[in-house]
Image: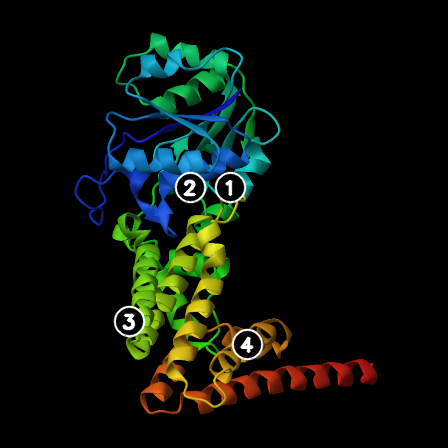
Amino acid sequence: MRIAILSALAESVGQAEASAGERPAFRRFAGKSVLYHQIDCAAHLGCERIICLSGASGPDMAGARGYAVRAGLRFEVAENLLRLVGAVTADDDVIVLADGLLPDCPALHAALGERPGVAAFAAEPAIGLGFERIDADRAWSGALRMRGAHVASLADLPPDCDLASSLLRIALQAGVRVVTIDQARLAEGTWQRHVQRHAAADLEKRWLNRQVQPAPFTAPGLALADRMAMRWAQDAGAARWARAPHLIAVALGAAAVIAGVMSWPLPGLGLLLVASFAFAVSKVFDRIETLGAPPRKPRSAMSAGPGIIDALLVVLLTLVLDTTPEWLRLALPLMMIAALRLGARNSAVGLRALHSDRVVLLAVLLAGASQGWAASIVVAITLMAIGGMLWASRAGQGQITAG
């Protein structure tokens, strides 16, 4: 069995920007803790179990266990070295990641994915960045892979010895090969011995913008929601509020249903507007959480969210519209939603995001409905969506003919 040995014991040392009592393993980078990034790497390397050395359990460790379970891994906590040694058998294949290490997953897989090894950088500039020296020319990256039989040697060491450094010495004495990693990982900041929150703020922002492309400003509602969500995800306190936008979206959606049942369509549209914004934020939070993680089955509730919002919008508009004949009260909203959904796939590339922007749509409809212009605005939006698709189709035909 392949096992990942992690650690969450080290305290912050010499880092004034760290919160009081914050451990390097729980410091956040790009929306989730360093320990979560290590769990992602363990999953990519084919590990089935994770053993984490930690002095005590708590909310952080409970969150890490839940994150590992969602990744399909067993997560066990060892309170001391003897218990850790007892959990590893001689036949196990062991991946070791040092406490507080932020590894670059593709580089780690390239170095250790095939066979045992000690991943290392050239001594300069790695030593200056806090990495442990191996010899005159190389410094340990904080990651290694070894046979489980070697872990038993920890039982002969003092109980307060450093886990990662001790396993490094054991691996080197056992003749495990040393694999050199590209120095560019250090220069880019994608491999860090310890994450320093404020020093990494700009790096986090660039990393997130590369990985999670926010909506373009042609869809202003989604663009605002995406950028606010990305900023919130960088906050140290965002972890405890990671499900807040999901809960807000559900609560306000339910409130919009109640408003519709009570025949209060305008308050219902307002509630649905805020629910749509919260839903857009929740999607960004989920995208950031799954960055670097193995593919997971999407939550059914998140997949159904856009359909639920559109259905509620149609129902509320039927209460707002005053048309003759009566069936137009349902037909007009349905045609608008159908045109927008088709436009999200078939309109000009620069306008597709706008067709999916329910935040702006609801803001426009709410403003128009409050002035008694709801029917005119619904028809105008439908015609513009259809016109956009016709224009895109005409432009596509022209390009084919010219070629």
Q: Quick check: can you spot residue 121?
A: no
In percent of width and height, residue 223 lies at 42, 72
Give, as a three-letter code, the residue at label 1: Cys
SS for callout 3: loop
Closest to the observer: 212 or 96?
Answer: 212
- What's under tag 2, amino acid-wise? His
Residue 11 visible to an observer of this rendering: yes
- What residue does disc 4 label? 340
Task: Check whether the beta carbons of the residues at disc 4 and disc 2 lie within 8 A of each other.
Answer: no
Task: Return the mark for residue 37.
Answer: 2
Q: Residue at x 73, y 81 (%)?
A: 396
Examine the rendered structure and indicate whether residue 62 appears above or below residue 301.
Answer: above
Q: Residue at x 28, y 52 (%)?
A: 241
Residue holding disc 1: 105
1 and 4 marks in contact (CB < 8 Å): no
Label 1 vs label 3, nearer the camera: 3
How much space separates mark 3 and mark 2, taking CA atoms? Answer: 47 Å
- Mark sitting earlier along the chain (4/2): 2
Q: Earlier in the sequence, mark 1 or mark 4?
A: 1
Among the 4 quarters of the image, the one containing residue 276: bottom left
